Image (cartoon, rainbow, N blue to C red):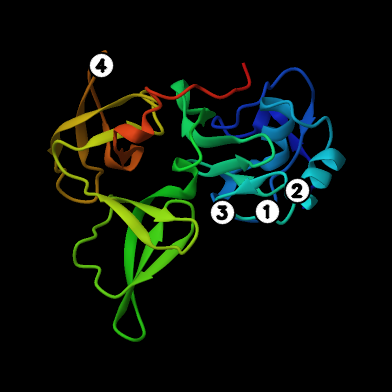
Amino acid sequence: MTKHQKRLSVPKSWPVERKTETFTVKAGAGPHGQAGVPLVVLLRDVLGYVDSKKEARYAIERGSVLVNGDSPSDEQRPIGMFDILSFPERDEYYRVFPDEGGRLALTAIDEDAAGSKLAKIEDKTQVAGERTQLNFHDGGNLLVDDASEYDAKDSVVVSNDDNEIVAHFPYEEGCLVTAVRGTHAGDVGEVTDIEVTPGSGSNGVIVEGEDGTFETVEEYVVVIDENFTGDDEASGGDAE
């Protein structure tokens, strides 16, 4: 298996320029699958806090950068949608949020907001002990005693300190969502209608946004609340 990643073939969500150089850093094993962006890419290419993998590794070993409240294992740790990057020495905190076109961007948040992370529930699994496992969009999961109030496509906010659910946003008509894939990626609006498709096809979603109504599919939206839109927060850097 190659240790290199060509820029031209990186996922569209990666915030990197594709034609400036031939190669970029390949993501290591971890959450978010192939869509995960190596931490060093955000530190070097987006924020400009380091100039090399060596400097990124040094910053990580010093505890200068945290991901979802924890020290990452290495500089190639995949970073993806709704992850929290914290820089305690700088008193800077960012949420990874889908930008226009589906590229991942950094939205500046305050320290309190950095203490928890949004997760979309992909499905639920019954496990031993009559407990239920909620499986999240990034590959993570959480065991709960009573999962009756949680459904697939709902979103929850999980505390970084104790891994407890501190907020729950049901997927239903009237909920606020952001599109994370498709032609409307990055758009935010309220769900006005959920169109159930017979058979195995994807259900359609009608969303009323600030710039008008758009239609997408359920798999492409994530339920959020107004605290996740970034309207009242300064935007972080992207690769433009």
Q: Earlier in the sequence, mark 2 or mark 3?
A: 3
Amino acid on which the number 1 mark rests in the picture: Pro
Q: Distance between the residues labelled 1 and 3?
A: 12 Å
Seen at 55% across and 50% down, the residue is 68
Q: How far apart are marks 1 and 4 (CA)?
A: 37 Å
The residue that mark 2 highlights is 60
Q: Earlier in the sequence, mark 1 or mark 4?
A: 1
Amino acid on which the number 2 mark rests in the picture: Ile
Q: What element carries label 3?
A: loop
Q: Residue 8: give x, y in percent of width and height.
A: 68, 27
Amino acid on which the number 4 mark rests in the picture: Glu
Q: Is residue 216 visible?
A: yes
Q: Residue 40: give x, y in percent of width and height.
A: 73, 39
Seen at 34% across and 34% down, the residue is 227
Judged left or right of residue 20, residue 185 is left
Q: How far apart are marks 3 and 4 (CA)?
A: 32 Å
Q: Earlier in the sequence, mark 1 or mark 3?
A: 3
Amino acid on which the number 3 mark rests in the picture: Pro
User: In front of the other: label 2 or label 4?
Assistant: 2
The residue that mark 4 highlights is 210
Seen at 70% across and 51% down, the residue is 28
Mark 3 closeness class: few <14, some 14–19, many ≥20 residues within 10 Å: some
Q: Is residue 82 visible?
A: no
Compared with 66, 205 (above or below) is above
Q: What element carries label 4?
A: loop
The residue that mark 3 highlights is 31
Badge number at residue 72: 1
Q: Mark 3 and mark 1 in contact (Cβ < 8 Å)?
A: no
Q: Distance between the residues labelled 2 and 3?
A: 18 Å
Judged left or right of residue 139, residue 86 is right
How many marks on residues?
4
